[in-house]
Amino acid sequence: RHGAGATVHLGEVADWPEVPLQLGQVSGLALDSDGNLIIFHRGDHRWGLNSFDIQGRYQQRSFGPIQQSTILVVDPNKGSVLKASGRNMFYLPHGISTDKDDNYWVTDVALHQVFKLGNKDRPVVVLGEAFEPGNDRNHFCKPTDVAVDPVTGNVFVSDGYCNSRIIVFSPEGKFITEWGAGIRIPFSVPHSLVFLPDKRELCVADRENGRIQCFLAESGDFTKEIKKDEFGGKVFAVSYAPVHGGLMYAVNGRSGLSVPLQGFVVNYSTKEILDTFSPESQEFRMPHDIVVSRDGTVFVGDADTNSVIKFTETFVQAHLKP
Ligand SMILES: O=C(N[C@@H](O)C(=O)O)c1ccccc1
């Protein structure tokens, strides 16, 4: 997307969205096949320190489901809301992904469930038992994200805050396999997933281990780990662009170490950090999900500032040697 010599830097698009979006905690972002941004947010619900008991059971069921529209389809250029849905369904939204048919796959950490949403008002597939945390084929514990293999339609679920595994289901929701238990250092909050279509690998933001781990989609065999000091010990989310050999995008999180909160662009093959970025107009406080579009535009959702920030590629002409 850019000529030789120029280095690319992602810069914040200051006047986006043109009209402020009424958002609660932004937990998940996705893109549909038209390049529209899908925002999954929590309206007037918040994940606080007393939202769950020690067993991981949600404590605020009496609040009822979020009444605002939790799923917003937003025009990527203006930030205007094209469609709003997801009312009276969710308690604590978390991850959202689209499949090749533009179905939405979402997770709710209070419900401990995964949903496939088509264009009907009732979910097409529901995985997990409402409000029942667990660790088997029919129960998750605060599942965090979903990724769908565009070829097989298989569904990968990162489970979750109180489990340490990836579970694989068929497109219809039949259990296929799971992995994570056997690996040398278990996942610690597998928090975000991205499917690499050109490599047919699944990558996981292993949040509290501050690393990205990748696996062959077919077998679950480990292929690669990307762990950088610059991450500072926490990686909250990953995304990917199958260009220039593969570019991995990530955002880190607040940790005891005093490293800046920022986004990263990493060369998938060499693991070299090509760029770091953060907004000028505000500070990241909890960058929680990240997506990258075909034209290289990046959106980051922040679950603490309740905002989505847009970044586009600016070209910093390399200083040609005299
Ligand atoms: O991680 C947490 N939250 C975010 O990831 C999120 O809001 O999804 C969290 C953990 C403990 C207590 C309160 C919040």
Image (cartoon, rainbow, N blue to C red):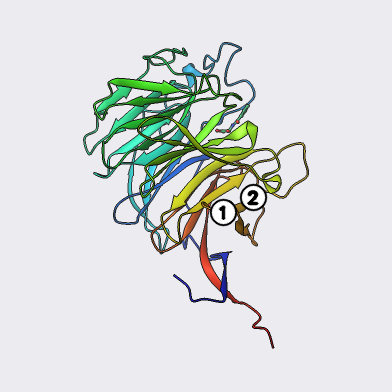
What is the three-letter code of the residue carrying label 1? Answer: Thr
The residue located at (49%, 57%) in the rendering is 298
- How crowded pointer 1 is (Cα within 10 Å; few <14, some 14-19, many 20+) is rated as few
Looking at the picture, does residue 62 appear above or below residue 92? above
The mark found on residue 270 in the picture is 1
Give 47 or 32, whichever is nearer the viewer: 32
Within 8 Å: ligand 1 and the Cβ of disc 1? no
Give 197 or 90, whichever is nearer the viewer: 197
Q: Pinpoint residue 158: horizontal percent, then vertical percent.
A: 46, 29
What secondary structure is found at the residue carrying circle 2?
A: loop
Q: Pinpoint residue 70: horizontal percent, then vertical percent.
A: 41, 38
Q: Earlier in the sequence, mark 1 or mark 2?
A: 1
What secondary structure is found at the residue carrying circle 1?
A: loop
The residue located at (59%, 47%) in the rendering is 251
Q: Pinpoint residue 1: horizontal percent, then vertical percent.
A: 44, 70
What is the three-letter code of the residue carrying label 2? Answer: Phe
Residue 112 in view of the camera = yes
Question: Which quarter holds ligand 1?
Answer: top right
The mark found on residue 284 in the picture is 2
- How crowded pointer 2 is (Cα within 10 Å; few <14, some 14-19, many 20+) is rated as many
Quadrant, the C terminus: bottom right
The answer to whether residue 8 is left or right of residue 111 is right
Closest to the camera, between mark 1 and mark 2, is 1
Residue 70 in view of the camera = no
The Cα atoms of the two marked residues, 1 and 2, are separated by 27 Å
The mark found on residue 248 in the picture is none
The answer to whether residue 291 is left or right of residue 273 is left
Give 195 or 311, whichever is nearer the viewer: 195
Q: Pinpoint residue 218: horizontal percent, then vertical percent.
A: 35, 33
